[in-house]
Image: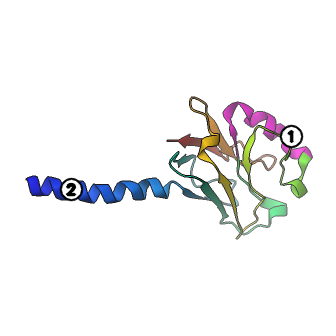
Amino acid sequence: MKTFTSLLFVLLSFTLPAFAEDNCSVSLDANDRMQYSTDHIQISRKCDKVTITLNHTGALPKTIMGHNIVITEQSAMQSVVSQSAKMGLNNNYIDSDNASIIAASAVAGGGESVTISVNPLQFEENKSYVFFCAVPGHFAGMQGTVKVI
């Protein structure tokens, strides 16, 4: 039994860092039906930088069914979304001067991928964070929570 316990400890010690390491890179998909593949992103404070990749698995171009990913505090989401239409596709539907935006990607069309990077230390404890698509009309069905562990 002691040998089994020792072996189990050794095996777990190798898997735990891999789990933490996996949280430094996140991938999610978006499709032509205005859906993300997940409604939850989990990242680790142990990472120096977290890379989030959005893969548009659909076929339609970004001028028709483009998607992006924006991260803000939950309390700021509605104001960012309200500004998105007037910002237009040329600005990726984002006001780059908006300080409440933690990160925002370019708009991806079908078959394209875009990547953003964030520093986990940007996220304050005891605050709620969200990710969403800022393309007008999309955020209602394309949003989720960001959990920093």
Task: Give the distance between the C-alpha atoms of the residues marked 2 and 1, in whole angstroms.
Answer: 53 Å
Disc 1, SS: helix
Residue bearing mark 1: 83
Is 52 above or below relative to 82? below
Closer to the chain start, of discs 2 and 1, is 2
Disc 2, SS: helix
Mark 1 crowd level (few <14, some 14–19, many ≥20, 10 Å Cα): some
Write the residue at 65% across / 66% down: 57
Write the residue at 78% across / 59% down: 107
Report the front residue among 64 and 126.
126
Disc 2 marks a residue whose amino acid type is Leu
How many marks can you see?
2
Which residue sits furthest front?
48
Q: Position of residue 76 (x, y in %)?
A: 74, 33
Helix, strand or loop: magenta stretch: helix
Q: Is residue 143 left or right of residue 88?
A: left
Tell me where the magenta segment starts and ends, as one range: 71-86
Q: Give the quarter of the image for residue 146.
A: top right
Is 113 above or below relative to 141? below
Kindly identify which numbered label has been placed on residue 8.
Answer: 2
Mark 2 crowd level (few <14, some 14–19, many ≥20, 10 Å Cα): few
Q: Is residue 54 left or right of residue 47?
A: right
Q: Give the quarter of the image for residue 24.
A: bottom right
Disc 1 marks a residue whose amino acid type is Gln
Q: Position of residue 129 (x, y in %)?
A: 63, 37
Q: Is residue 78 magenta?
A: yes
